Image: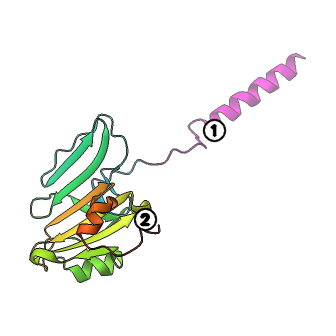
Amino acid sequence: MGIMRFTILSLAILLTSMFAGCNNTKQPEAVNMTGVDLATHSIDGVGVGTTMPNFTIDRAGVEIEADGQNLNSLFITLGDYDGEFFRSGKPVLITPDTSPTEIEEKFGEPYWRDSSDGELILFYEYQGGGIEIQFEFPDSKSLAYITIAKDGVLSEAGQRQSFGVDKAWPPAG
């Protein structure tokens, strides 16, 4: 019995020393993505329409609108913005020189386009109209502003009517 106890104890010590530091429950690495992700509708990992406890933005060119701790919208002035843009975590080049054609090449056909008052706004609707991205071109050529909003402008029937929207609502997807 004494030998068996010694053998089990020795085996336990041997196995512990062999696998010390081995961790089979690898934790995912934190992604340090600072910027605006246009596919996840988020800034620094916090999505528009979600709760943002203890979240602050100290970045040039970005204004947020929040209701308590809920992030409702982002307004980005491209000429002042000092961050990066992503699409599903991959960098995407968007600058004030980005044209409407380039936006459509990157994001597809917009749900609606408004070209009144000499400016162009491309409206992209996601989550059945629950999230809206607007790309604004004041001179119809150069991108100046991006707005990402929960329940955006076109989510309201009166606004769709004033913009002359003749497509079905809510949009698919």
Numbered disc total: 2
Quadrant into which the N terminus falls: top right
Q: Is residue 6 visible?
A: yes
Where is 70 relative to 113, above or below?
A: above
Can residue 4 be found in the magenta stretch? yes
Q: Label 2, on which residue?
A: 170
Is 19 on the left-hand or right-hand side of 65? right
Circle 1: element type: helix
| Residue 168 or residue 173, whichever sits in front | 168
Q: Earlier in the sequence, mark 2 or mark 1?
A: 1
The quadrant where residue 24 appears: top right
Location of residue 110 (image quadrant) = bottom left
Residue at 70 percent across and 35 percent down: it is 15
Q: How dense is the environment of label 1, judged by Cα within 10 Å: few (below 14), some, or many (20 and up)? A: few
Question: Could you tell whether 53 is left or right of 56 in the image?
Answer: right
- Residue extending furthest right? 1
- In magenta, the rendered stretch is 1-29
Three-letter code, disc 1: Phe
Determine whether label 2 and label 1 are within 8 Å by CB. no
Q: Residue 29's x, y, as percent?
A: 44, 48
Residue that sits furthest to the top in the current view: 2
The structure residue drawn at horizontal position 30% and vertical position 58%, both measured from the top left corner, is 152
Position of residue 28 measured from the top left corner of the image (x, y, whole percent) = 49, 48
Q: Pointer 1: what residue?
A: 19
